[in-house]
Image (cartoon, rainbow, N blue to C red):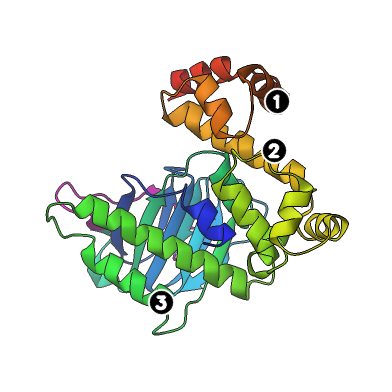
Amino acid sequence: MDALSDLLQRSRARGAAFSRTTMYGEWCVQFPVGGTLAIHSIIDGDLQAWTVDGPDAPVRVVGGDVVLVRAAPHLMASDPAATPQPLPRSETSRSASAGNPEAGREAQFFCGAYVFEGDLSKSLLDTLPPIARIRPRGGSALRSALDLLIAQVDIGDAGQQVLLDRLLDAVLVLALREWFATSGSAPRWIFALDDPALAPALHAMHTEPERAWTVATLAGLTHQSRSGFARRFTDTIGVPPLQYLADWRMSVAKEALRDTVDSVATIAGSVGYASEYAFAAAFKRHTGQAPGRWRSAQAAAA
């Protein structure tokens, strides 16, 4: 498993929202936040997309394009000057339409609202611009996965929500892979995914955060000297190995505090701390709060 898989393993769609929309004439639709990532597939049309508060100019998107939008209210329109309106909804299906079909200029698009949770997911989202446009090739895996997801959106069979969630997971992985391969703006840690001098160490930290890793033991996994490994890791990823490990442990601990009823002592051991006291001190340095107080605040905000 590579490091991108390690991150995505903890970032799966659960109860995602889906819609397929047909618009006619001149229109502008505003999307609320509704999640931490929106995935739009333009089925047909010539549109503009932009964030409400973003400084960037609208991005032109056409049939076949895929758009990833980070957590922000955003708009899509045939004409940016048109009055924004809410996304049309249907009481009986995930498909809806608005406007006068006789007005011509039809546009169709599919939307999936992806709810990420936790710091581990944030590390992925932070690699994207506010609006990322992807143009998958015909016959590509991304195009095929999208076609299947769109075809399934209005089927009401048993287990359909779970199926749609898993298809959306596949679309996200393929879209991120395509974006990183073609955008020229991949973050530094992405380059480590295919680097045999770093990938084994990253995978070890991700999958066994409870181990008492040292720079020497991590270097041994990559068959390098301690100093050579530390220098290459820091130059590529931007932080030293043990700082990366500490940050990863805190992210895993946050997810456990929020999503499980495990005791603080149990969580401390699961992320490599020999005592609850040592973990609590490290956690407070990282977040400004003791683990129990942080957990209570998260529960109150849910």
The residue carrying pointer 1 sits among few (fewer than 14), some (14 to 19) or many (20 or more) residues within 10 Å by Cα, namely: some
Residue ID at (61%, 68%): 180
Residue bearing mark 1: 282
Compared to 64, does 212 lie above or below? above
For the residue marked with disc 3, what is the amino acid?
Answer: Ala
Q: Residue 279, percent across and down?
A: 65, 24
Where residue 99 appears, x then y in whole percent? 28, 60
- Please give the residue where the numbered disc 2 appears in the rendered image: 246
Tell whether 97 sits left or right of 210.
left
Residue in front for this viewpoint, 276 or 195:
276
Image position of 4 with respect to 287: above or below? below
Q: Which element carries disc 1, helix, strand or loop?
A: helix
Per the model, the C-alpha gap separating discs 2 and 1 is: 9 Å
Residue 79: tell me if it is visible: no
Q: Separation of disc 3 and disc 1 at Cα?
A: 43 Å
Closer to the camera, 204 or 144? 204
Q: Is residue 101 visible in this depiction of the protein?
A: yes
Residue at 74% x, 64% y is 223
Q: Residue at x 58, y 58 (%)?
A: 3
Q: Residue at x 48, y 50 (%)?
A: 37
The quarter of the picture where residue 119 lies is top right
Q: Amino acid at mark 1?
A: Ala
Q: Earlier in the sequence, mark 2 or mark 3?
A: 3
The residue beneath circle 3 is 141
Left or right: residue 92 compared with residue 211: left
Which tag is nearer the camera, tag 2 or tag 3?
2
Q: Secondary structure at mark 3?
A: helix
Of the residues tagged 3 and 1, which is closer to the observer?
1
Identified by mark 2, the residue type is: Ala
Q: CA distance from mark 2 to mark 3?
A: 36 Å
Question: Are the residues flagged by discs 2 and 1 in contact, CB closer than 8 Å?
Answer: yes
Q: Which residues are magenta?
A: 78-96
